[in-house]
Amino acid sequence: EVQLVESGGGLVKPGGSLRLSCAASGFTFSDYSMNWVRQAPGKGLEWVSSISSSSAYIYYADSVKGRFTISRDNAKNSLFLQMDSLRAEDTAVYYCARDLLLLAALSGACDYWGQGTLVAVSS
Amino acid sequence: SYVLTQPPSVSVAPGQTARITCGGNNIGSKSVHWYQQKPGQAPVLVVYDDSDRPSGIPERLSGSNSGNTATLTISRVEDGDGADYYCQVWDNSSDHPGVFGTGTKVTVL
């Protein structure tokens, strides 16, 4: 069974940092690209960042570029999102999601999602 | 950046057909994915690459894409279809390729 479990969320002050983790199991992690998607309270989905299976291709939304860094450790079946210079508008549930395609370029289609971790940025 | 526009809400009676549109410039040239999200839950992929369904998704949900509009059609609507629906594209021509639509709340009357 495919499982994605996010952790690392919490309350942080503006300008602070957090590192989110996503532990993957039930599939060959190194074969799939991965994505981070967020959802502010009461709002829609927002794509944040994506990383290809070998980390060769990395993309960011304009709203987080230069502040967030996506990475992965295929040996540990883990995905990460380092979030620096956090702002109030970064407050959201952050989801880790697997890309649909096996051993291929990113498609953006996310076939498995974690339960999400809440990041709250407030003074 | 690429913008996807959806109607905020759609209302439909049980047994009828709901159509949710997703508008974008020349969206017909891109692959469109659709998600269903119920309150308090993670999104679920219901259609990918315009019209393909993941395993376990009923045939009542179908997708199409042409010109400037992609459409998710829910036939024979059931109470359980009430949810938020989001379209998404991966815009390979952009440095910021992941784009979600604004979302549509489907209410089953």
Image: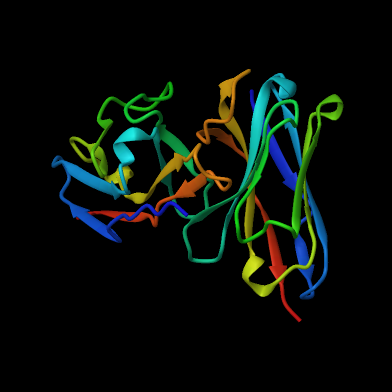
Number of on-image labels: 0
- Residue A94 at what x, y percent from top left? 64, 53
Identify the residue at the far bottom of this view.
A123
- Residue A68 at what x, y percent from top left? 74, 55
| Residue B20 falls left or right of residue B95 | left
Identify the residue at the far right of this view.
A75
| Residue A64 falls left or right of residue B24 | right
The residue that appears at 23% across and 39% down in the rendered structure is B67
The residue that appears at 27% across and 59% down in the rendered structure is B9
For the C terminus of chain B, the image quarter is bottom left
Up/down of B88 relative to B47, above or below: below
| Residue B103 falls left or right of residue A97 | left
Nearer the observer, A66 or B43: A66
Nearer the observer, B78 or B42: B42
The residue that appears at 82% across and 69% down in the rendered structure is A16
Up/down of A52 relative to A61, above or below: above
- Residue A24 at what x, y percent from top left? 73, 31
- Residue B53 at what x, y percent from top left? 37, 25
Identify the residue at the far front of this view.
B93
Up/down of B41 relative to A42, above or below: above
Up/down of A7 relative to B102, above or below: above
The residue that appears at 16% across and 41% down in the rendered structure is B17
